[in-house]
Image (tube, grey):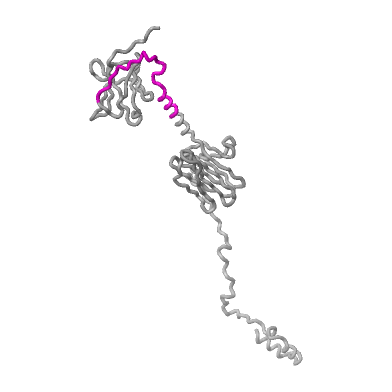
């Protein structure tokens, strides 16, 4: 192809050839053209496109039956902040084992999670520790010392979970960050409140006189206690002419309480109905002799015997 062009130029008149000879060499020469029968150079092919130019379609897998059951259980266990649960700016949840408590936070705001007074942290674990700051501190002293877990997100639109384990229970929280933050959250403990009421009632019952309202002149203390000397050995026994009372020391609440048997006229011991009222056995009858027995192979026996007849109530 290049040789045909040169031949054409030689055929021109001399003046035309002189003018063409003055042209730059770049214009006079034409780029080489590969012949049709020559193989193409690899450099002439365009480079392949990267794999990122062809985005792959992610296959969305349908949730399994087990996953659906887990989602349903998590929804049922969720506890949301309610208006009636706020004490000033602190949301107070009723504690329930296995519940998931929602905590709403915001960037540049610290939210306080207050535990029960006297409760000690064992561990704190967050699902996302890169974008959430979690720390703890304490307030108060002695029996009123209280642990506070402090939470702060780095940005809005985040979500993770938090697990707090203590020496009394475990807490499960769902953390979310937005534009508004809860100042704090705490719990009340219905089960502990019921136990405290029961303990107070038991203490009041134990402190109350077991024979309250009875005239002193009707009480008969003519009983003797003999036999073995275990830690639960009764302090004394008495009756009011209708009931018999056996008083024990505080050791009775520590170990196993011995059953009471009434010894009949035939010398045989028979189990009798009685009830425990504080530190007293109350028997709704009188007896001449009774025995407290505990153990099987080496039985401990304490005998209670009346040494004087019961006093009768006086007529007004």
Q: Position of residue 11 (x, y in %)?
A: 72, 90
Furthest residue in direction front, as rendered = 217
Q: In which quadrant will I find the C terminus? A: top left
Nearer-the-camera pick, 252 or 144: 144
Q: Position of residue 30 (x, y in %)?
A: 67, 82
Q: Position of residue 67 (x, y in %)?
A: 49, 45
Q: Residue at x 26, y 29 (%)?
A: 295
Q: Is residue 132 left or right of residue 203?
A: right
Quadrant where the image shows the N terminus:
bottom right
* Residue for point 27% across, 16% down: 307
x 24%, y 19%: residue: 268
- The answer to whether residue 290 shows anywhere in this view is no
Residue 258 among those drawn in magenta: no
Q: Is residue 161 above or below residue 230?
A: below
Question: Which residue is rendered at x = 48% and y = 32% of the image?
Answer: 193
Residue 145: give x, y in percent of width and height.
48, 41
Where is 10 relative to 226, above or below? below
User: Looking at the image, can residue 113 be seen?
Assistant: yes
Q: Is residue 266 left or right of residue 279?
A: left
The magenta span reads 199-227
**Which of these two is toward me, 182 or 216?**
216
Q: Which residue appears farthest toward the bottom when viewing the image?
A: 14
Nearer to the camera, 306 or 289: 306
């Amino acid at each position: 192809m290049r040789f045909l062009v040169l031949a054409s130029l030689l055929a021109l008149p001399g003046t035309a050839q002189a003018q063409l000879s003055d042209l730059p060499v770049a214009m006079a020469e034409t780029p080489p053209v590969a012949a049709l029968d020559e193989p193409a150079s690899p450099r002439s092919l365009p480079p392949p496109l990267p794999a990122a130019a062809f985005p792959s379609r992610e296959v969305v897998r349908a949730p399994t039956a087990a996953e659906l059951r887990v989602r349903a259980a998590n929804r049922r266990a969720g506890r949301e902040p309610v208006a009636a649960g706020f004490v000033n700016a602190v949301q107070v949840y009723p504690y329930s084992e296995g519940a998931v408590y929602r905590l709403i936070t915001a960037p540049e705001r610290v939210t306080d999670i207050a535990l029960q007074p006297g409760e000690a942290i064992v561990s704190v674990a967050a699902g996302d520790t890169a974008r959430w700051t979690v720390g703890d501190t304490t307030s108060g002293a002695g029996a009123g010392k209280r642990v506070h877990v402090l939470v702060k997100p780095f940005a809005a639109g985040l979500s993770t979970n938090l697990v707090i384990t203590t020496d009394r229970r475990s807490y499960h929280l769902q953390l979310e960050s937005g534009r508004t933050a809860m100042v704090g959250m705490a719990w009340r403990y219905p089960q502990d409140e019921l136990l405290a009421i029961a303990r107070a009632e038991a203490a009041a019952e134990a402190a109350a006189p077991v024979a309250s309202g009875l005239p002193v002149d009707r009480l008969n203390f003519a009983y003797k206690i003999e036999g073995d000397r275990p830690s639960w050995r009764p302090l004394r026994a008495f009756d009011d002419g209708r009931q018999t009372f056996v008083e024990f020391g505080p050791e009775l609440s520590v170990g196993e309480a011995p059953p009471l048997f009434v010894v009949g006229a035939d010398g045989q011991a028979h189990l009798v109905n009685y009830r425990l009222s504080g530190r007293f056995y109350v028997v709704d009858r009188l007896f001449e002799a009774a025995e407290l027995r505990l153990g099987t192979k080496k039985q401990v026996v304490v005998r209670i015997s009346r040494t004087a007849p019961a006093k009768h109530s006086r007529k007004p």
